[in-house]
Amino acid sequence: MSMIDRLRMRRASFSPNGSTTVSTSSSGASTPSSYFGNKLTMPYETPDSSGINWLFALPDELLERVMVGLDRVTLSRCFRVCTRLNDLLNTSIPISLHYTLLCSSLRLNPNSIKPSRDNPNHIPPSKALLLSTLRERLTRFRNFQPKPSASHQNQIKFQESEGRLYEYLEGVLLRNVPPFEGSREIGKQVAVYELSKRDDWEDLPSTSTNNADRSSFDNDKQEGDLSSDQMEEKRKKKDDEGEEEEEIIVGEREDELINDIRRTNQFDFDMQDFAVDPGQDLFVVAETRHTSPRNSTLHIHLLTLSTFQPHPLAAQSTLDWPVTLHTRVSALGFQICDDGLYVLRNNSSGSKDHLVGWQWTTGRMALTLKAPAVSTFESFILLTPTSFLIPSVHTRLRPDSLIQDDLADARDLIFTHHLHIYAFPPFSTSQIKEGEPLPPAHSPTHIAVIDLPKFLIDLDEDLPPPRMTIRTDPPPRSQFPSHPKENPQQFIPDPESGIIIMEFYCQPLNAIFGQNNRPHFVLFSLKKTFLAYLPAPTSPLLVQAFPRPAPVIKWKSIADKVRFIGPDEPEQSWVCYVYGSRYVVPYHHEAESSTTIRLYDFDPLRVRQELYSRRDSNFTASAPQSPRGIVHRLMFGLSTSTSPPTSSATTPNEDIKFDGDKDGIYLITEETVLKKKSPLDQEVRSGKDLPFIYAEKKLRKEVETVVMDGERLVVFDYRGDEEVMEIMDF
């Protein structure tokens, strides 16, 4: 008997009933009856003897519930089964809504379709209305602009002057109010703009216009019985009263508009920093108390966003930083995800950066992590509810260093940039019993180290190492938003979807680049790229410490899955420029006093849909002959020497490119190549497996900054000396 036959016999011996059926072949050798052993046939796999299809015998309501429970791939295959099933999938609103959400990497918030107990007059939106809203939002990517309205709802005066603290997430905009005009101090007051309330306003100007037309018709009818002198006198009196009344009405409407959307609150302490989670009605504000001239303590208050009172779900309204601070110069970074609150404190006085996580509902300090002695924690994000991504700058001594000659020689140091992955167990694994002390804080496990591109660093030539920030929104939460109760967020991005933005701030001190031309690089990556390096949820790496260093992943292994662009990317004023798989950035044109707002989309399904639509329509990419087309390609490190191949000049074996502009959407699938040029220390190739699309809108004005969430873009510009917000909805 051959080795293959023995392996088959061994595989067949593990049958469910413990017996092996062996048959004798024509050659006399004994072989198992089945390569995979005896498989039990389930009852639903046996066709009905009478030929009845019991699946289609179900009512449409039950069949819809079956289809809504399927995943995207299985549901896509169901469209090709038969005509009966295809008609049901195309005509059923619940199935269409479910399928559209799956194809857009979104989830439906069940709290948005529940009736309100506090307000019996509240009518939740139907699934038909939700489907219409979702389709409209997805199609507005090509032409993002303010919705047509007769009122001035899209232009909102921004009352605060330039401040140091700001935050924008899911329709809630926060900014600190300086103590006095032109001050750079943070102060004690915060202003909250609830931009989501705009959708609930009525179109008052059109109503007033109809009333005015009706009243003017009545007045004209009455004036027909008066003399010419009486009519002239009455009209003059009417004009004078109308101008005064119009000024009063406009003033009242503006006050009502501002008071409805904006509110402020003043604390009895100076704010250090703040964060917000509108879905949980949570507002977090940090306070620093100076206990002595050299020592201070940090306290974090857990308040409600609606009333600024202690949050009812928090067992402790104030969380204390675990150690005493010996420096006043520090920066805080926040992440709020479900019941977890994570704070990173960056120090500039030589002490280690410190990351602390609390279970804010119980007040337990769940984890603590300090940067290594020769590394920094530049920033951090939550990759999953139980894992971190932390960019870091590592410093080490050169192997050939002559440190005995000069201890302060900067040429003896090597600076490298890395991305660290840390993981920790869920907070629910530690059970808190009443009367017992809280369990100690957990130290996250170092999972992997990912090398990033190398930069030229020469402290003697005023070329310090670039600083980094990392950003993604919203956090990968598993709980659905429940606030505001009358209108919670309807569509939530899938926790494993979305992009990660990492920025490299090059800060040369010499005059080669200049203050306004400092190199700036941006790295794009899908979350799934780094999720592949995480261990399984049941892995002991999450709960045990192993005496081994984290494996190092070279840049070449991830270069094709990420995209690295620069060095002419603009540095944005605010950090609220990413939501889900979209990223927005303004490009300023100083010569024309205009700004181009560019909206990127990295969602793999939408990019694939755009690629397939161009392939089916025989789209031919045009050569970048215009200066604008060449500039566009240079921005992403694309080649401009040869024109893209056309469908007529290519053979079936050649790779046809569909890059270019089609109906206002630009598609980029080519690899990005950045040459070895200061400040880069190597040629960087990236983006081969990360295509993306983007759309543009040019504004004939200078835009200060742009922020975004899943439903709107907020553009900040100046009208005279006043800062104005312009709302662009999806």
Image: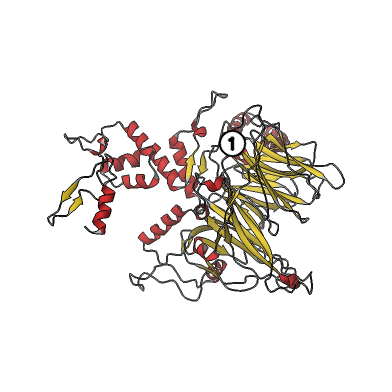
Residue 639, image x, y percentages: 51, 72
Left or right relative to 480: residue 589: right
Residue located farthest toward the front when viewing the structure as drawn? 1
Residue 264, image x, y percentages: 73, 37
Q: Tell me if residue 231 comes above or below residue 394 in the rendering.
A: above
Instruction: Decide which of 701, 51 is in the foreground and name it.
Output: 51
Q: Quadrant of the N terminus?
A: bottom left
Q: Tell me if residue 706 comes above or below residue 256 in the rendering.
A: below
How crowded pointer 1 is (Cα within 10 Å; few <14, some 14-19, many 20+) is rated as: few
* Residue at the (71%, 65%) spot, across then down: 507
Residue 280, image x, y percentages: 61, 35
Count the marks. Answer: 1
Regarding mark 1 in the picture, which secondary structure is present there?
A: loop
Instruction: Decide which of 87, 463 is in the foreground and name it.
Output: 463
Identify the colour scheme used: secondary structure
* Residue at the (62%, 40%) spot, across then down: 340
Q: Residue 256's quadrant in the figure? A: top right
Residue located farthest toward the bottom when viewing the structure as drawn? 641
On the question of residue 65 being in view, the answer is yes
Residue located farthest toward the left when viewing the structure as drawn? 26
Residue located beneath label 1 in the image: 430
Residue 405, image x, y percentages: 79, 75
* Residue at the (12%, 55%) spot, across then down: 26
Q: Residue 702's quadrant in the figure? A: bottom right
On the question of residue 595 being in view, the answer is no
Instruction: Decide which of 90, 363 is in the foreground and name it.
Output: 363
Q: Which amino acid type corresponds to the residue marked 1 in the rendered image?
A: Ser
